[in-house]
Image: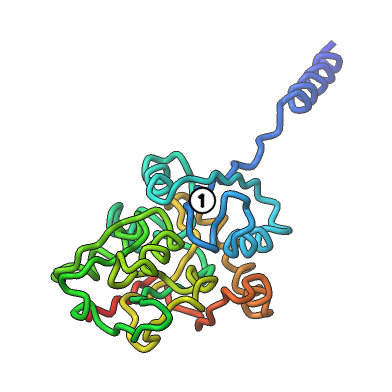
Amino acid sequence: MKRYLSGFRVLLFAAVILSTPAVADPVIRIAVPDITSLLTENRDGVYQRILHRALEGLDVPVTEQFFPYKRAMMVFEQHGADCIYSFTEVLERRLGDDAVIASFPLGKFTYYLFTPQDADPISSLSQVVGKTVGAVIGHETYLDGVLEGHDVNVIWSKSDAQNLAMLEHQRFGAMIAAVPDVRPFMDELSYDPKTPLLESYDRLTCHNTEANRQFLGKLSARMKSLKEAGLYEQLAGQLYVEFEDPAPAAEHSLLN
């Protein structure tokens, strides 16, 4: 009788194991802000192409949701997303250095002052004091520190294309934009490449959790290998900006 009971217990245990659903890997939810040329609602922006290539073979379930620039960051801050493209230094300041972690860079970006193509380039904010300057709404998250202490009237509009139109109609004395975002408009613009306002890196930024640490560890290794193999340049085309393998997330602001 005991032998029969023992066999029954084994069968019962096996049935319980087989009937228990497997625990699925957690889905990484990524918020996608609207960044000219780099991140699009159609999922064909430069950074999206790079990330999607890096995710191949990682077997990590990922979802992406596109938002207006500022709303994307709000969704991330309220934990409606696990990760977000860009905003690393901004979120470190807002949430604390230990609250977020970031991947190997997707790319480098640099803010400059731009004037119409047939005008002399502007090398300093002091040259636009008292004038109206255009910039994309949401970019104040990066530019507030650069603009502080300068009497410049900034109009925050929806896009670089809109600012360019205002610039061409002489509604703005200059516009502030980032390279590589504005590369598609460069034939219509003039700037001084030797006098950047701010330089930094775009990364995938995530809440500092164990799952996200494991995810970014694998992802960053893949991203670095893609960069070294020349895939970044191939995927980005004219929007590619070369950068050295940087130290952990750090923003370099050049005030002038």
Q: Does the image show residue 177?
A: yes
User: Which residue appears at 27% of the width and 67% of the height?
Assistant: 133
Q: Report helix, strand or loop for mark 1.
A: strand
Q: Quadrant of the C terminus?
A: bottom left
Compared across the picture, whether 184 is left or right of 71 comes to right
Q: Does the image show residue 98?
A: no
User: Which residue appears at 28% of the width and 80% of the height?
Assistant: 254
- Graded by Cα atoms within 10 Å as few (under 14), some (14 to 19) or many (20 or more), the crowding at tag 1 reads many
Residue 3, position as x, y percentages in the image = 85, 17
Q: Is residue 99 above or below residue 12?
A: below
In the image, what residue type sits under mark 1? Val
Residue 248, position as x, y percentages in the image = 42, 72
Compared across the picture, whether 241 is left or right of 6 comes to left
Report which residue position mark 1 lands on: 32
Give 1 or 151, whichever is nearer the viewer. 151
Give 65 or 82, whichever is nearer the viewer. 65
Compared across the picture, whether 155 is left or right of 240 comes to left
Displayed quadrant of residue 24: top right
Q: Is residue 79 above or below residue 211?
A: above
Residue farthest along the top direction in this orientation? 1
Q: Quadrant of the N terminus?
A: top right
User: Which residue appears at 50% of the width and 81% of the height?
Assistant: 243
Give 187 or 37, whichever is nearer the viewer. 187
Residue 89, position as x, y percentages in the image = 35, 63
Q: Is residue 30 above or below residue 252?
A: above
Residue farthest along the bottom direction in this orientation? 194
Q: How is the image coloured?
A: rainbow
Displayed quadrant of residue 38: bottom right
Give 204 or 3, whichever is nearer the viewer. 204
